Amino acid sequence: MSIFTAFVKPRESDNALFELLCSWLYFIDLNEIEVSVPLLDAFVLSLCSRLGFRPVLDYCVICSKSFQDMIRENLSGPNKGKRFLPGFYSGGGGLVCNGCRLQKEQIHEDIFVCGLKEVSHLQVLLKGQWTLISEYDIPAKEAENIHKLVYEFAVYHNEYSIPDWSLELR
């Protein structure tokens, strides 16, 4: 609940946010599952989306290069691999291609390098389908990277401080 109240202040009436919270709590209660960091990350992404801050993951937020073109660039050509990883730009609202990531890094903007797997995992979390997400297996290192991206995105787009929900589960 502390995550929800960090985003939504008391006496702010919003049916869509209420339905989101109820669906999430109902799912947790009905299925009697242990809440995981990826499941909480998905809830936070859904909350951000309902508040108008849905991260863009299907194209570069700077030059509009499609995610598919980023995949092709990463998997082919003479410089394939790590040097052509996309980034996640919280201030810009989502995914950036390798070229735009490098430009932003040169001017010391906060860009998180993320692999194609992390972007794909984020796309799953954004679906907000609690059953799918609770059964979805994300390797520990990738889950940790995804949490960093989600947390920084949430902090950037919220006016108030937000407790790191991964610390509350430990």
Image: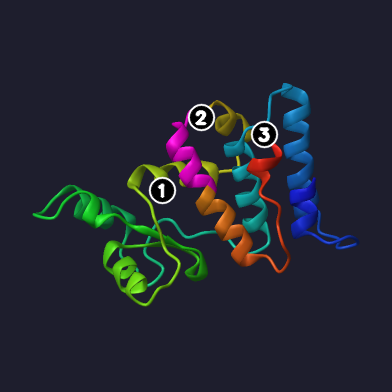
Q: As drawn, is 7 to the left or to the right of 148?
A: right
- The mark found on residue 170 in the picture is 3
Task: Determine which quarter of the picture holds residue 128.
Answer: top right
144 or 34: which is nearer to us?
Answer: 144
Q: Where's residue 142, x and y in %?
A: 43, 39
51 or 104: which is nearer to us?
Answer: 104
Q: Which residue is under mark 2?
A: 136
Q: Is label 2 or label 3 in front?
A: 3
Q: Dot 2, crowdedness within 10 Å: few (<14), some or many (≥20)?
A: some
Q: Dot 1, crowdedness within 10 Å: few (<14), some or many (≥20)?
A: many
- At x 30%, y 65%, the residue is 65
Residue type at mark 3 is: Arg
- At x 27%, y 56%, the residue is 70
The boundaries of the magenta stretch are: 137-147
- At x 8%, y 54%, the residue is 78
Whether 36 is drawn above or below 95: the answer is above
Q: Which residue is under mark 1?
A: 119
Q: Where's residue 5, x and y in %?
A: 80, 54
Residue type at mark 1 is: Val
* Mark 2 residue element: loop
* Mark 3 residue element: loop
Residue type at mark 2 is: Tyr
Q: Earlier in the sequence, mark 2 or mark 3?
A: 2
- Which colour style is shown? rainbow
- At x 60%, y 43%, the residue is 42
Q: Earlier in the sequence, mark 3 or mark 1?
A: 1
Cα separation, mark 2 vs mark 1, equals 15 Å
Chief secondary structure of the magenta portion: helix
- Pointers 2 and 1 in contact (CB under 8 A)? no
Q: Where's residue 152, x and y in %?
A: 56, 58
